Image (spheres, rainbow, N blue to C red):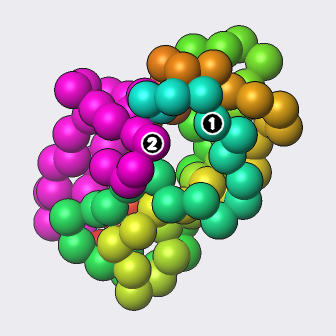
Amino acid sequence: MREGWTSEQAWWKRVGNIVFLFGSIRSTYGVNPAAGDPLFDLPVNAAKAENITCMTNMSWHQVSILASAGSKTVKLVAGESGDWPTGTEIYLSGQYVAV
C-alpha cells in the first residue's frame, strides 16, 4: 500500500495470467486524491493497461483505477472531487488484471 492508504482486508490471488483483487483499501487520513496518485502495487507487472471502476464506502463516490502495462503500480484515474474523510474505502472485490 502507498502512503496514506492501508489494508487489513485486501489481498491478491494469481491464477495463470490473471491477478484477482479482493477486499478493500482504506485511507489513513483525510485525503483529496488526484488523478495519477498511486494507490497500491500488484505482485507482478500488468501485461496491458487495465482501467477498473471501483465503488467506495461513500455511496456518491465511484472511482477509476489504472494498472499500466509493464508496471506494478495501480494509480487513481478519476473519482469524485472534494475531500475524502479518513477511513474512505475503495472496494477491490471482483476486479482483475492481466499479467
Q: Amino acid at mark 1?
A: Val
Q: Horizontal and vertical percent for residue 96?
A: 39, 51
Vertical comparison of 59 with 36: above or below: above
Q: Residue at x 16, y 56 (%)?
A: 14
**Is 11 part of what is drawn in magenta?**
yes
Identify residue type, mark 2: Gly
Quick one: label 1, few (<14), some, or many (20+) residues within 10 Å? some
Residue 16 visible, this orientation: yes
Where disc 2 sits, the SS reads loop
Instruction: Tell me the residue that label 1 is attached to.
Output: 31
* Label ID, residue 4: 2
The tag on residue 8 is none
- Which residue is nearer to you in this view: 64 or 26? 26
User: Does 15 sit left or right of 26 as displayed?
Assistant: left
The range drawn in magenta is: 1-26
Q: Mark 2–mark 1 contact, CB under 8 Å? A: yes
Secondary structure state at the residue bearing disc 1: loop
Image quadrant assignment for residue 71: bottom left
Residue 87 lies left or right of residue 93; in this view the side is right
Q: Is residue 16 magenta?
A: yes
In the current view of this chain or complex, which residue is farthest to the right? 81
